[in-house]
Amino acid sequence: MLTELKREAYEANLSLPRHGLVHLNFGNASALDRRRGIFAIKPSGVDYAELRPADMVLVDLHGQTVEGKLRPSSDTPTHAALYRGFAHAAGVVHTHSLYGTAFAQAGREIPALGTTHADFFHGPIPVTRGLTRQEIAGDYEVETGNVICATFASRDAEAIPAVLVKSHAPFVWGPSAAKAVENAVALELCAQLAYFTLQISSAKIVLDPHLHRRHFTRKHGPTAYYGQAK
């Protein structure tokens, strides 16, 4: 069932260690068939080197397993919450990438300091509030998804397809699993650049909003002209 969806999720998961975004068994990727309301996600705790397309678990938007012999990722309820909350998303990636996770642990957003950031994100990558004790003790993974969605109540989740969960790590999304992986790579690059920039300069750095907007709209939206026509 949904063989191509499983392969899309499988390929997205394998790309995470290849890009240095995960270590050990941390992290996961999923791919959504929005029409059917079913997504494929990495099984819990399975080593990336042992992963096969058939191992991907099919899950509905309420986090219930539809098909699969293995348990889905423990982060499945968070993926489901993001798919419910972000109608444009068809791929979600969760990493524990080094620099992105460092910003998350510090409870600090990744600031937009230059055009590399602006090429991918139309604003700083925000950090969520911390979960309450009740949320941690309850449906923790669901509440993690809820706090991410709440963070975007006044932000554009399509223009900034990434977030840092405070004290935890990054989650990113996109119109496909492959695009979500690309956004995860971009987040980590932007986190590294921000870290080193802030080490080099103690001055307050502000990216000109006009330059930010120009770089973002070159690649995104109806006026984009970067790359080749499809």
Image: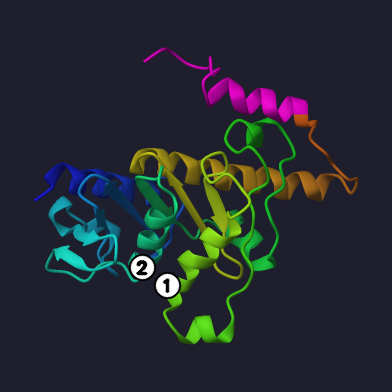
In this rendering, position of residue 87 left or right of residue 35: right
CB atoms at circles 2 and 1 under 8 Å apart?
Answer: yes
**Quadrant of the frame with the C terminus:** top left
Residue span colored magenta: 210-230
Three-letter code for the amino acid on which mark 2 is drawn: Pro
Question: Which amino acid, mark 1?
Answer: Glu
- The reply to whether residue 73 is visible in this rendering is yes
- Is 212 part of what is drawn in magenta? yes
Residue 95, position as x, y percentages in the image:
46, 57
Residue depicted at 40% across the width and 45% down the height: 89
- Compare marks 2 and 1 and give the one earlier in the sequence: 2
Residue drawn at x 23%, y 44% is 35
Residue 169 shows in this picture: no
Q: Is residue 193 above or below residue 222?
A: below
Left of 130 or right of it: where is 145?
A: left
Pick whichever, 62 or 214, lies toward us: 62
Which residue is identified by label 2?
A: 77
